[in-house]
Structures are given as structure tokens and as C-alpha cells.
Amino acid sequence: RGRLAPLHLPPAGVGLTMDGPAHPAISDLTVHAAVFSMPVDDELRSTTIRLWSFQRPHMRAFHMSWISFFVAFLGWFSLSPLIPLVRVSMGLCANGGWDDFEHASECVCDVKCQRQLWTSDTVSFAGTIVSRLVIGAVLEGSGPRICQACLLMAGALPLALVGVSTTMTQLTVTRFFLGLVGATFVPSQYWTTCMFAPNVVGAATSTAAGWGNLGAAAAAVLVPWMVTWFSPMGVIDGDSAWRGVPPILAAIMVVLAPLLLLYSDDLPSGPYREQFQAMGSAPGRGESI
């Protein structure tokens, strides 16, 4: 129940078109690519990977999955390289009223300071654990594209609010909700699984996961550069400089979310929910395509 029957493909070398009545369950769907540019199996999943291609639906979904994953992790881990400035900004330094952002590394972080930072980090990962448990059930009913876009939009707000936090309590609460974007790993993996055949799905999912996880490493390089980038713009105060970074990353997430919806596909045969509608039923708990 809830599964499309295998399609009967044309002979090798003949282009597979999706605008004909080849299969009653998908004959009425709007499919963006009339002919697949890649070889597919009987479930329309690609049997090869072309990393240089951005063609819909297979490679477009592949690149959208890891790019959205990358951007989400870039925002999620953006606070880590900013910790020296955050300690000064939040008044956590044990050596008096330390407010020298140019020498933030000289801030003494005592046991109390370390405990507050540890709590903030732990709460952020707790948010990710909760969101990953929930997103699995939502993913089965809505598909990877909508779930990924919603996670980006949901994570953009707390990421922007990180820049206006004035106390560790505020920062910790916003980081909990920012942890939602840690669940982007789940739709990313599911998305590539839907698009690639068993002979290449392992390579596709591992590559998308690896490239997406690079967002955490990119944060360590890009975020400090972004802080220094504000100096030529006249934002020379260290407190203002680090606070300007999260809203920029949040804006990137907001821009990317609708692009996923407009320019990519859940499945080779079209939007996820339309597959169920074409079969005369709606996805429910426990059902899958």
C-alpha cells in the first residue's frame, strides 16, 4: 500500500518521456523534465552520478540536498568561532569588567563561565535530537523538499536572534531552536535515496552527507573572516561585528528555502504528495512512496 508499481521502460537508447500515459498513477502529474538525461531503473531512479551536472530531477535534487545541508550547518556552527567575542559581550570574563574585543583571547573563563557555555552547547544539540526524531515522521507525509525548506525557514529566525541576545539565557534559548537545522541531515539523506538506484545510492548519500557536513568546517573559516569584513564598512566595534554575522547567514537560509521548492523535485516522477493524490489516497502515518 502506498507504493507505485514498477514502470515498464522503453528499450535501451530510447528516451523516457513523462508526458505520456505510461503509468496511470503518474500520467496526470506535471513533470518538469520531459526526458531524463540520465539512465534510470524501473523506479525512475538514476543508475549513475554526474557531479558536474545540475540537470533535473536527479542531479538537481542531489545538489540541492547537500547545499541546503551545508548552509544549515554553516549557520548552526557559526557561533563556535565567535565564542571569544561572545564571552566578552556577555560579561562572562572572570578578570573584572573585561570589554577589550581586540584582545578577547585574554578573557579569563572560569568554571562558571565554562559551565554556562557548556550548557548552551548542550541545549543546542538537544534541540537537534528532538527535531531529528520529529522530522522522520513528517518526512514520510510531506517529502524531503518541503521538510528541508521548512527546517531552513524555522532555523533562520533563531539564528538571526542570536545576534540580538544580551544574556546567556537568551542565547541558550535561541540556540535550542537553532538546533532544529541539525535535522537537515535527515531530509538530505532521504532525498538522495529517492533519486538514485541501489548501485549508486551509497555513493550519492555519502557524498551529499560529506559535502553537507563541510558547512561546520566552513563556519570556522568564513565566520572569523566575516567579522573582520565589517571593519572596512565602519563597524569596528567587536560587539557589533560578531552580532552582524548570524543575521547574514539567516538571510541566506531564507533565500535558499523557496529555491528548493521552486527549482527542485522530491521524486523523479514529480512532487511527493501528488504521487498519493494520483493514486487516490493521501499519505498517512507509516506510509511511504
Image (cartoon, rainbow, N blue to C red):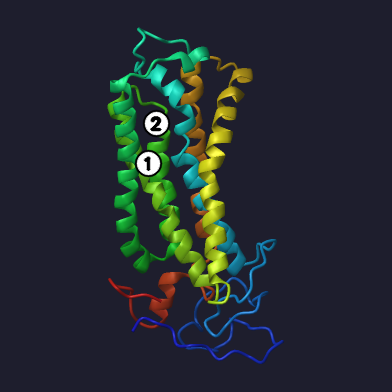
Residue flagged by tag 2: what amino acid is it? Val
Q: Which mark is residue 92?
A: none
Q: Secondary structure at mark 2?
A: helix
The span from disc 2 to disc 1 (Cα, nearest Å) is 9 Å
On the image, which quarter does residue 170 sit in?
top left
Mark 1 neighbour class, 10 Å CA radius: few under 14, some 14 to 19, many 20 or more: many
Q: In the drawing, does residue 193 fall left or right of residue 147?
A: right
- The percent position of residue 77, horizontal first and vertical second, equals 46, 39
Where the C terminus falls, by quadrant? bottom left
Q: Measuring 52% from the left and 82% from the top, which residue is drawn there?
A: 43
User: Mark 1 highlights which residue?
Assistant: 178
- The percent position of residue 8, horizontal first and vertical second, equals 55, 91
Where the N terminus falls, by quadrant? bottom left
Q: Is residue 180 visible?
A: yes
User: Mark 2 highlights which residue?
Assistant: 162
Q: In the drawing, does residue 106 fall left or right of residue 234?
A: left
Along the line of sight, which residue is nearer the eye, 110 or 284?
A: 110
Q: Measuring 51% from the left and 84% from the top, which residue is drawn there?
A: 27
Q: Secondary structure at mark 1?
A: helix
Q: Are marks 2 and 1 in contact (CB under 8 Å)?
A: yes
Q: Is residue 253 visible?
A: no
Q: In the drawing, does residue 65 fall left or right of residue 132?
A: right
Q: Measuring 37% from the left and 19% from the top, which residue is drawn there?
A: 109
